[in-house]
Every structure is written in C-alpha cells, then in structure tokens.
Amino acid sequence: MAACASAAQPPPQAPPFDGKRAFEHLRKIVDIGPRPAGSPGAARTREYITAQLKALGLSVQEQAFDAATPIGPISTINLRTTIPGTNGTSGPRLIIAGHYDTKLFKEIEFVGASDGGSSTAFLIELARVLKDATLTMPIELVFFDGEEAVIDWNVGNDNTYGSRHYVAEARREGTLKDIHAMILIDMVGDRDLRIMRDTNSTPWLTDIFWSAARRLGHTQFVDEAMDIQDDHIPFLQAGVPAVDIIDLDYPAWHTEHDTIDKVSAESLQVVGDVLLAGLPEVIGRRTR
C-alpha cells in the first residue's frame, strides 16, 4: 500500500513518544506484582493508571461488570479515556487499546512484564503524547481487564472478557458504528522485539504500520505471519477494522521469567515511533 507523505510524521504538535518514560511506568506496574482480574493487584493497577491519566488532565471512566468465568463471576473493570479531536468527542473515533491484567497462576509468581505490563505502560505514555496533539478525530484509549483466560483460553469463552463486554456495550448503546478502527497493543516490551503480521487483522491496517516500520528502518516488524487470538477479535467479529501489534515470539510468555529484565525501553520506543508514524494515515482512511 502506498503511504501518503504525511503518514511518516507524528500527529501535528505531538511531542515524541518517550520509551524511557514508558519503561518507568512499566517498572512501577511490575512492582505491583500479579494483577489477575478481580485481584487486589488489578485494583492497585487501576489506581495507578487513573492517577497518571488524571495528572495529564484526562478524565477516566470505569466500565465495570461481572465476568462469567469457569470459576464463577469475577469483578472486571475496563478503563476508558478519550482525547478529543478538533470537533470534540463527537463523530467517528479511533480506539487504541491494550490489557492490564495478568494471567492467573497458582503455582508461579507471574508479574507479566511484557504480557500486560508493556501495553499498560505504553498506553499511559501514549496518552501524554496525544493529549497535546491536534487530532482530526477523537482517540479513545481503552485499558482492558480480563483479557487472560482464567483456566484455558481454548475452552469455551474463557478469554477476552473485557473486550467482549466493550463491544457488547457499544452495540447496545448504538455507538459501535462510530468506531473508525481499533489498534491493539499487546506484549511490545520484549528486548528481542520481533512483531509478526497477524493473519486475522485487517490487511490495510497491518500494511500501514508495517510500511511505517520500513520507512523508519525498524526491522523488528517482520513479514512472517501468525494466527493470533487476542482482544481485537471481538471487534473484527463486529465488523470493526482492527490490527494487533504484538510480539508472541517471546520465550518468557506465561512463565515466571516474564520479568523486568526481559523488557526494554528501546522496544517500547520502536513501537511508539511506528504507531505515531502510521496514525495519520489510519485516521485519514475511509473505512466503512
């Protein structure tokens, strides 16, 4: 796909993404410890996210519900904040999202530095960048809870509780049609960053970000393909264009070794640069 000339630039007046700032948020999130949905760790993580966003002058909405899981109902809470466009918060909006929960393990101490921590830290730093940008479309940042399976991702609907609830509520409220596109950030902290193309993602969205990575010389975005099930799937099933930017080529995934020493500010910086480089073309694209 040919990129327009402006696509190589961040949104007008936006400060640059700072991977070191994001990494400091990541360090503090990991220090909280395990953060499964419904746990004290998840509550402390929400408090941290909310405090950081409010310090930026952004309001935060909680989308709370009881997730029906194989071990019974679990209190699950998505966090949402919207950065207005030039016409305020009305009209089509772009969603950029990630999850903040970690998988529930009884036998290991799982702190999810890349898996859950990196997406949370990334979105907090992205909020700082975008709040001062001139945006022609409002951007909603969503911190999903309950992405992880409670027992087994492949059994029933034991996964993506937060994103499925978000889509169901948007459909009920009649706002699903206003979602321009959805960009999912997940597991982007790996020191040895290697992001493959997800075969489920909307091709034009994938092409925009992989083209942006090539222009910037970031070879961490590779053309190898992988079928990825993640929080973007409920949006795709609802007809919303969506892309998953994720590094699943990560040996520490769902192990006690997914710790702060396995992630880096440089990897967060790469993804931040690529996202901002592709964002104008995403916003300018006619979708539906």
Image (cartoon, rainbow, N blue to C red):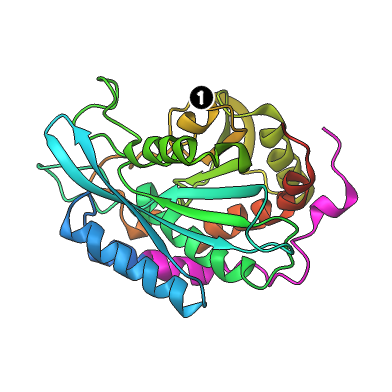
**Where in the figure is residue 260, as x and y percent of width and height?**
34, 60
**Where in the figure is residue 148, as x and y percent of width and height?**
30, 39
Q: Nearer the viewer, residue 29 or 253?
A: 29
**Where in the figure is residue 182, as x and y percent of width and height?**
58, 41
Task: Check the image and report above or below for 249 versus 79.
Answer: above
**Where in the figure is residue 139, as x and y percent of width and height?**
61, 56
Q: Does 92 lie within the magenta span?
A: no
Let me know if residue 6 appears in the view: yes
Residue drawn 12% across the image and 35% down it: 72
Q: Quick one: which residue is furthest to the top in this view?
A: 155
Q: Nearer the viewer, residue 222 or 124?
A: 124
Q: Amino acid at mark 1?
A: Gln
Q: Which residues are magenta?
A: 1-26
Residue 70 horizontal side relative to residue 81, left or right: left
Residue drawn 18% across the image and 43% down it: 74
Q: Nearer the viewer, residue 148 or 176?
A: 176
Let me know if residue 264 appears in the view: no
Quarter in which the C terminus is drawn: top right
Q: Does 25 lie within the magenta span?
A: yes
- Residue 32 is drawn in which quadrant? bottom left
Task: Check the image and report above or below for 83 versus 271.
Answer: below
Residue 75 horizontal side relative to residue 266, left or right: left
For label 1, the SS is helix
Quarter in which the N terminus is drawn: top right
* 10 Å crowding of disc 1: few (<14), some (14-19), many (20+): few
Residue drawn 76% across the image and 52% down it: 280
Mark 1 lies on residue: 237
